[in-house]
Amino acid sequence: MEPHPLYFVPPPYLTRTKPPCRLSDPAQPHKLCRRRQPTHPPLSICFTCKGKHLKRSKYYYYCATCNLEFHRGCHVFLPEIRSAFHPSHPLTFTALDPEFNASIIHQNWRDSSASEESSEELINEVVDYDHEDAGDDAVANEDDDEDAVPNDDDNGGGGGDIYAVAYNDGASLSYGNHLKCKCCASPLEKLYYHCSTCKFNLNLTCSMRPPPTTISHLKFHEHTLTLFLVRITWPCDVCGFLLNKDTDDLVYACLPCSLMVHRSCIYLPRVIKITRHPHRLSLTSSLQPGDFSCGLCRHTVDVNCGQYSCDKGCQYAIHSKCATWRDVWDGIDLDGVPEEPEEYIEPPFLKIDEDTIQHFSHHEHYMKLHVKKTITEKDKFCEACTLPVMISQRFYGCMECDFVLDEACASLPRKIYNPLHKHPLTLHVVPTIDTYTDPNMPITKVIFNCIGCLRYGCGFHYRCHEKGCEEFLLDVRCASLPDPLIHGCHAHDLFFNFTGGICMGCGTSECSSFFLECIKCKSFLGIKCATLPSEAHYRHDRHPLTLCYRDYMTSHHWCEICESKLSTYYWFYTCDSCKITLHVTCLLGKDIYVKPHYTFVSDSSHDDQFEIARNEGNSRQLCSNCNLRCAQTLVFKRRGEYESFCTLTCLGDSLDS
């Protein structure tokens, strides 16, 4: 038989020594007390299952006001209860599950030493349960369960009562699945309470852990808020979403103020700080008249609804749900926390004179400003972005070694606030690993993987240092993208708002982990394509090649390198003077952000060293993994071995095997 039950762990107010009597008025509840032999007489008859005292049962529950007795477990599943949601009439227990048997409730109920917190966490735990063996197993285990019952004078009194119930996710249509619970607005379960007079229904789980009927939260509102069970098509006064849209969130109202809000909106933080704005943001009920667009989703902000706005008077606003999203906000409420002075961030370099600096990443030597004037076979590569220095580009070169930084990368800040992450990011140089003691051996480093564009890199990168976010890492090109971005491929501004779609550059939805979106056109650009260099070198052309986004005049081109057809629908590189065209991958290679003459080790074993070399021989080498000719611009060689790999993917596959 298919098992589909739940083990219910009642909430704290049902697991104490004196739980409330569910037949009592919710405004003035009665308390149940435990009765134990021999100081009290044995149970005469249980109000719920009509059964008598169980053999060797150590205690039962008794309500002195109602003069009723209950087995353990039966005090929860009463045939009739009074609820604060429906005070005018009592609610009748209804079991639509034909396999449900109220007479074995007490037999499957056991006590545990679970704390109140763990009881609340376990209330929805799903366990396998066989209906055919339920009764026999329950009776057989009754003695063991009774031995686990704590004494009346135990501290905290009572444990978590657990009862196995034959329970489905919901009743079928013939059982009345079209009806909904008035509390959670979900379809009725197979066990629920019902008022036939008012057609009122309350799921069993909602009756066991009802939300508060009133909430007093002076930070949010000066009046007491009352639970509003009627679902209406009306926007929440805080988040702006419809009150009947989210069925899992209850609605509370203040009738004197005509205020209606979701329960979760009551507990929104008052003051927050997000990386998308330099100042703190405060929750406000309304804004000054004007046109505001959300700082995250870029949609219009309703000035009549609650939102977060800048404390310093900036024309900045963001929806309350957008601002408190887990990928945007760090979860810290700054209400009442004094604002600290702005943190001093050390500059990336010390200026010696007009053309000379001392950079933090290369502090042992001075670096001098140069301008590249000619194309050479051995290009200089920037240590930060790992791209070759272009003609007429200004760069800083070490006065004593080959260390090079282009002018933009030399000015990269040591610490940034990036829209893709909720914590500040710190600039890092790729760490070195001393695997050899020979000073003549090259410095050994590691390869990292950018979480934005999903490319491998060996240059500088930005990393998060907050606990739990240590894996968040961006290369300098992805971290330097502005928000919004003005890109030559599109006429409108592109924004970071954690959405995705088909990339305009490569035509796939797997382009990157993050996308830039045009709000007007609903089009997307992946970070991987957004960070492609606008100009690149080709060793057989004396002119720089430019990135072409579309060519509507010509139906097709041919790639100069692979000599195959080149689709003009996707991006490619071209020389306007020589009229040659090349695929992006053919010109730049698959591993674009790694540079030649770089030695690194694998993550699995630091004994394996690999060197990145130019693939410029008279004949292409064979890849040791895929057995194909290495067609990329770079090749990866294992030091001390006659092994070469065409891509980092092939190298990784070889190490895994």
Image (cartoon, grey):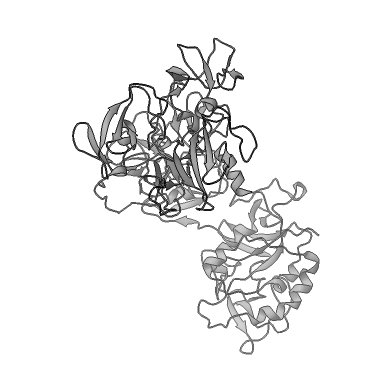
Number of numbered discs on residues: 0
Q: Position of residue 487 (x, y in %)?
A: 43, 24
Counting from the top left corner in percent of width and height, residue 482 is at 38, 32
* Foreground of the two, 510 or 87: 510
Does residue 402 appear in the picture of this structure? yes
Left or right, 540 with respect to 344, comes to: right
Considering every residue shown, the one lying at the far left of the view is 353
| Residue 399 locus on image (x, y percent) | 27, 36
Residue farthest along the bottom direction in this orientation: 38
Q: Quadrant of residue 53?
A: bottom right
User: Splitting the image into 4 quarters, where does residue 417 fall?
Assistant: top left
Q: Taking 41 as reference, is 357 above or below it?
A: above
The answer to whether 10 is drawn above or below residue 472 in the figure is below
Of the pair 488 and 313, the residue shown nearer to us? 488
In the image, residue 451 lies at what x, y percent?
48, 42
Q: Visible in this render: residue 327?
A: no
Give the answer, above or below, for where 350 lies relative to 465.
Answer: above
Q: Quadrant of the N terminus?
A: bottom right
Residue located at (57% from left, 42% from top):
642
Seen at 76% across and 63% down, the residue is 100
